[in-house]
């Protein structure tokens, strides 16, 4: 006999699956937001989502896959927020102001989580991802906006760069920002850390005559 009170009754199987997966992802986001590594467990995910551990395994090969998805989705969201900032950056803004915006946004995004949580999430990602190099490529979404900004900017302070140069320079800044957080360095997110990242950006993006 069909249980007519079940919320998934009369909903097509595909829609039920999509709804369940989104509910599980939403529960995972809430657990990540708690900033406690101990929260990122199968039991807590089951309790938070309302699905049993066995039910979650119907949709995911491993529980790690859920948190891996949240990790990479968060990085994509942060990068898209930065794209919006770059596209709104004024034509009369200097390269220094542009770099401060990029560095501050990147630092705050990594610093908003307990480094132990970041380390655990990144470990899940690099262990489970079929193409771990995709993590570095997430930041490439900034390339068109940065090139367009250089072309429309009237301050003559931003170096004219090729797409490949921008790609590699962004990788350098990204690594300088995230490495101390992932390594649990006590100076991660400090003024000294920010100053070093900013100096790297100056060396890469700003025209020599505009550095003084």
Image (tube, rainbow, N blue to C red):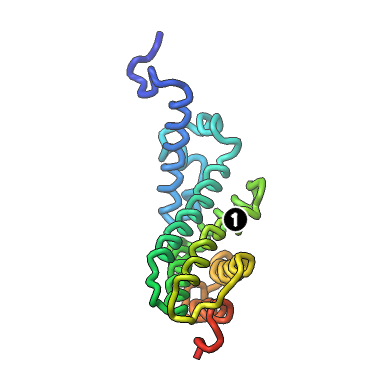
Q: Which quadrant does the N terminus fall into? A: top left
Number of numbered discs overlaid on the protein picture? 1
Residue 84 screen position, x and y as percent:
41, 60
Residue 134 screen position, x and y as percent:
62, 53
Q: Count residues near mark 1 (Cα–Cα under 10 Å), then give few for <14, some for 14-19, many for 20+.
A: some
19 or 182: nearer the viewer: 19
> For the point 40% across and 73% down, which residue is it?
91
Tag 1 secondary structure: helix
Q: Is residue 26 visible?
A: yes
Q: Is residue 184 visible?
A: no
44 or 85: nearer the viewer: 85
> For the point 43% across and 63% down, which residue is it?
112
In the image, residue 149 sits, relative to residue 76, either above or below, namely below
> For the point 54% across and 70% down, which residue is it?
177
Residue 37 screen position, x and y as percent:
50, 54
Instruction: Please identify the residue farthest to the bottom as the structure is shown.
Output: 212
Instruction: Please identify the residue farthest to the left as the structure is shown.
Output: 5
Quadrant of the image occupied by residue 162: bottom right
22 or 100: nearer the viewer: 100
In the image, residue 47 sits, relative to residue 164, either above or below, namely above
Residue 5 screen position, x and y as percent:
33, 18
154 or 195: nearer the viewer: 154
Q: Left or right: where does residue 92 sit relative to residue 206?
A: left
> For the point 59% across and 72% down, which residue is it?
161
- What residue did someone put label 1 on? 135
């Amino acid at each position: 006999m069909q249980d007519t009170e079940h919320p998934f009754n009369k909903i097509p199987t595909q829609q039920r699956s999509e709804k369940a997966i989104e509910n599980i992802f939403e529960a995972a986001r809430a657990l990540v937001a708690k900033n406690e590594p101990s929260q990122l467990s199968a039991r807590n995910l089951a309790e938070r989502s309302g699905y049993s551990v066995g039910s979650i395994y119907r949709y995911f090969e491993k529980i790690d896959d859920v948190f891996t998805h949240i990790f990479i989705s968060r990085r994509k969201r942060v990068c898209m927020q930065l794209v919006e900032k770059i596209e709104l950056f004024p034509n009369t803004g200097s390269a220094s102001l542009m770099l401060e915006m990029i560095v501050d946004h990147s630092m705050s995004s990594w610093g908003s989580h307990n480094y132990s949580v970041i380390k655990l999430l990144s470990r899940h990602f690099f262990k489970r991802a079929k193409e771990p190099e995709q993590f570095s490529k997430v930041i490439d979404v900034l390339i068109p906006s940065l090139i367009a900004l250089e072309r429309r900017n009237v301050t003559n302070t931003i170096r004219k760069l090729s797409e490949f140069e921008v790609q590699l320079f962004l990788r350098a800044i990204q690594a300088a920002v995230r490495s101390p957080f992932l390594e649990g360095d006590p100076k991660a997110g400090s003024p000294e850390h920010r100053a070093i990242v900013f100096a790297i950006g100056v060396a890469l993006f700003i025209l020599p005559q505009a550095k003084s």
